[in-house]
Amino acid sequence: MNQNKRKKAIIMGAAGRDFHDFNMHFRDNKEFEVKAFTQNAEQNLGVLSDKPERYYPKELAGKLYKKGIPIYSEEMLPELIKKFDADEVFFSYSDNSHEHVMHKASIALAAGANFTLLGAKAIMIKSRKPVIAVCAVRTGCGKSQTSRRICEILKKLGKKTVAIREPMPYGDLRKQISIRFASYKDLEKNNCTIEEREEYEPYIEEGFVIYAGVDYAKILSEAEKESEVIVWDGGNNELSFYKPDLLIVVTDPFRIGHETLYHPGETNLLMADVVLINKVNSAPASSVKRLEENISRANPKSKILKASSVISLNEKIELNGKKVLCVEDGPTVTHGGMGFGAAYVYAKNHNAVIVDPRPYVVGSINSVFKEFTQLKKVLPAMGYSKEQLKELEKTINDVPCDLVLAGTPIDLARIVRANKKIVRVKYALGKEVDPELKKLIQETLKKKK
C-alpha cells in the first residue's frame, strides 16, 4: 500500500492493553499510521495536559515510527481526531461498562472517525508451552488468588510454572520491556507503584516468579525458558494476551449482572471453558443462584465451579469494639465499583468500629473520593506516585483509630510509615475447589502434550 494512503489511527488506552494492541496489530503494519495514543485519567494515571507528556518510545514503536508516538489525555480525543484527520479510533482498555464504551464510540463517530475494537485473534500470542489463563468479568473478582492457587497445584504436580501479568507500565517504558519479579529487591529496583506491588508481591511471598512489562512476545520468550506451564493472571477484566489452552473466568456474586454489562468482561464470559463463582461463603445464596443462572444462559457450554474466598489476619488480634481504619485494594474499590473489600468484611464480622476516613483524606486522594462516590468507610490504597504515597501515609496517620486493617494484597507496612499498627487481612481461594481444578489442569496438560 502507498505510504500516503495509510489509515490514520488513534489508540485509546490506559497504559496497558493499548501498548499490547499496538505491538500485535500496528507495529510494522503499513496499512496503519498510528498518530497518537490517548490515556484515561480515571484509570489511575493522573491528568495529562493538552501537550503530550509521554511518548511510546521509538525503541518499542518499530521502524515506521522514528520519533515514537505521542500520548495525550483522552479528553482531547475530538480535537485529536480533527488535528490528525484520523480515520480510525481503536478502543483498548478494560473494565468499562458497555454504556461507557458506546459513549466513547459516539464521540469518535461525531468527530468523523470509525470506532473499532480488536478481538482475540488479533491480539493473542500462541505459546509453545501450555497456557492456563485466568480472567474475570470485573476487577476485584478474585482472579489473582485463583491464579496463585493454580500455580500451587501445578507445583504439587511437579510442574515448573511462572505467572505473567497484564502490564502496568507507568514509568520509563524503555526499561520495562520485560521485567522478571522474583524477590522484594526486584520491586524496589523497578520503583513499583502500590498497584504493581499488589499484583507481584503475593507471588513473591509464595515463592513464584511473575513477569510483566510492555512487549509480551519478548516476555513470553523469556518465561518459556524457565517454565513448563504459563499462567496468565489477567488485569482488571482484560482479555488474555496469550491463546489459552484452558480459560478460567472468575465472577462475583456481589455484582450480579455485571458479568454481561462490562467490556471486555462479557467477552471473557462468552469464551470461558470454566466459570468460577467466587466468594460463595460470604455472598447471599440467592445471589449465587442468580449468577449461576446468568452464566448458564450466556455460556451454556462452560463448566461452573463455586469457591469460597477465605479471609484471615496475619496475626491473632482482638477486634471487638476496636476503632479500625479499613484500607482496601485500590482498583477494586475505585473503577471496580465495589464500596468495600476484605478488610471491611473482616471488621464487620468481628464487631470492630469502622472509622470513616473521609474527613481526613488529603490531596489527590480527596479527588478519588469525589470521583468514586461508592467509597464511604474504606480508604483505597492509592500510591501511583511518591507524592500520592505521602498523601496516603498522612491520611492513615491522621485518622483517629486503634489500628489499620490492610485489605490490599501487599504488606503496607513496608512502604508506609504509620503511627499505628497495621494488620494485614489476607484472602485466599477456598481449598474445596482444588480437586476439580487439579482435574481440569491435568486434562489440559494431557491434551497439550
Image: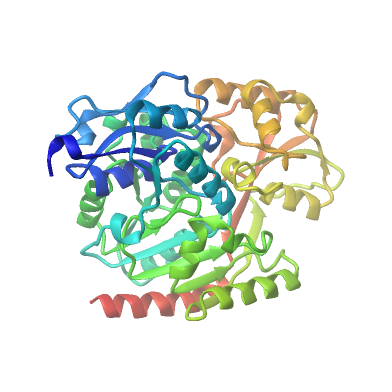
Q: Residue at x 60, y 65 (%)?
A: 278
Q: Position of residue 194 (x, y in %)?
A: 51, 35
Q: What coloring was used for the rendering?
A: rainbow
Q: Residue at x 45, y 68 (%)?
A: 248
Q: Nearer the viewer, residue 246 or 259?
A: 259
Q: Report the quarter where the C terminus lies.
A: bottom left
Q: Position of residue 46 (x, y in %)?
A: 52, 27
Q: Nearer the viewer, residue 173 or 405?
A: 173
> Would residue 334 be found to the left or right of residue 14 on screen?
right
| 128 in relation to 91, above or below | below
Q: Residue at x 46, y 48 (%)?
A: 205
**In which quadrant of the rendered view does residue 312 lie?**
bottom right
> Would residue 284 be found to the left or right of residue 71 on screen?
right
| 431 in relation to 24, above or below | below
| 241 in relation to 15, above or below | below
Q: Nearer the viewer, residue 268 or 376?
A: 268
Q: Is residue 102 visible?
A: yes
Q: Is residue 172 visible?
A: no
Q: Report the quarter where the N terminus lies.
A: top left
Q: Position of residue 422 (x, y in %)?
A: 66, 36
> Would residue 392 be found to the left or right of residue 446 on screen?
right
Q: Position of residue 148 (x, y in %)?
A: 46, 59
| 447 in relation to 165, above or below | below
**In which quadrant of the rendered view does residue 392 lie?**
top right
Report how many numbered discs are placed on residues in the image: 0
Q: Residue at x 53, y 64 (%)?
A: 250
